[in-house]
Image: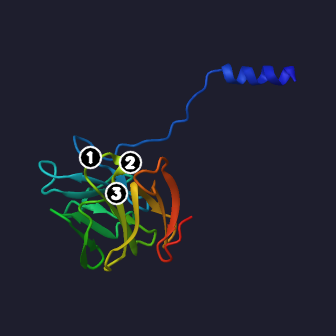
């Protein structure tokens, strides 16, 4: 037993070298805020514009380097699989555009983040009161099918959406009422309204 303890101590007291991953610069100069990977991890997307590029947009470069091309001509929030552009507008309206065919619809999100299902056929968003103590603010959670009308599915105090677990179930947190002491983490089936 003592021999094993000494061997372990010798291993732990020795110099530990961190593993390094190979890296390669794919762009140079002063550019590239908001760099993110494409869903297939083959390219990087970034915001750029004048003077480095002719116009502002979302640009793309292969992970191995090479030519920079403009992927999207406008700035927007994009769905995880880059199927949708989400453009909050002034006031309540947010425009969602399906990139495959340019078809659009609007939702009254008041600029709130949109959370997509994995298939990107349904979405959820939360609208909260804008004043008062966060723990007492009323948050309303809405869901909608693509091109469909939103439906209120939950009202919480100090709550938020954490994501979709599948095409029908949201992971939410919040207090059941403003006076409740503790915040809960729970799932909500948006088709049956069953909370667990």
Which numbered tag is attached to residue 33? Answer: 1
Q: Secondary structure at mark 2?
A: helix
Residue 183 horizontal/vertical position (percent): 48, 50
Q: Between residue 161 and residue 22, name the one nearer to us.
A: 161
Q: Which residue is mark 2?
A: 135
Q: Residue at x 39, y 55 (%)?
A: 157
Whether residues under marks 1 and 2 lie with C-beta atoms below 8 angstroms apart, the answer is no
Q: Between residue 195 and residue 58, name the one nearer to us.
A: 195
* Residue 21 visible, this angle: yes
Q: Is residue 122 above or below residue 62?
A: below
Q: Residue at x 47, y 41 (%)?
A: 22
Q: Residues within 10 Å of mark 1 (few under 14, many from 20)?
A: few
Q: Is residue 124 above or below residue 50?
A: below
Which numbered tag is attached to residue 138? Answer: 3
Mark 1 vs mark 3: in front: 3
Task: Measure how far apart labels 2 and 3 are at the Cα level.
Answer: 8 Å
Residue 149 horizontal/vertical position (percent): 31, 78
Drawn side of residue 35 relative to residue 160, left or right: left
Report the colour scheme: rainbow
Q: Secondary structure at mark 3?
A: strand
Kindly give the residue lying farthest to the front in the view shown: 179
Task: Measure how far apart labels 1 and 3 are at the Cα level.
Answer: 34 Å
Which numbered tag is attached to residue 114? Answer: none
């Amino acid at each position: 037993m003592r021999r094993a303890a000494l061997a372990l101590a010798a291993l732990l007291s020795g110099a530990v070298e961190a593993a390094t991953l190979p890296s390669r610069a794919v762009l140079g100069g002063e550019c590239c805020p908001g760099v993110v990977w494409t869903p297939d991890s083959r390219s990087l997307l970034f915001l750029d514009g004048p003077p480095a590029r002719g116009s502002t947009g979302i640009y793309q470069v292969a992970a191995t380097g090479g030519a920079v091309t403009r992927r999207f001509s406008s700035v927007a929030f994009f769905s995880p699989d880059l199927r949708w552009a989400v453009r909050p507008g002034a006031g309540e309206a947010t425009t969602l555009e399906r990139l495959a065919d340019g078809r659009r619809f609007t939702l009254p999100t008041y600029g709130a983040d949109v959370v997509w299902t994995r298939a990107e056929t349904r979405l959820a968003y939360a609208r909260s009161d804008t004043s008062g103590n966060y723990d007492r603010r009323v948050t309303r959670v809405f869901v909608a099918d693509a091109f469909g009308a939103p439906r209120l599915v939950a009202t919480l105090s100090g709550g938020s959406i954490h994501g979709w677990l599948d095409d029908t179930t949201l992971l939410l947190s919040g207090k059941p009422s403003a006076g409740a002491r503790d915040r809960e983490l729970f799932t909500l089936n948006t088709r049956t309204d069953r909370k667990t």
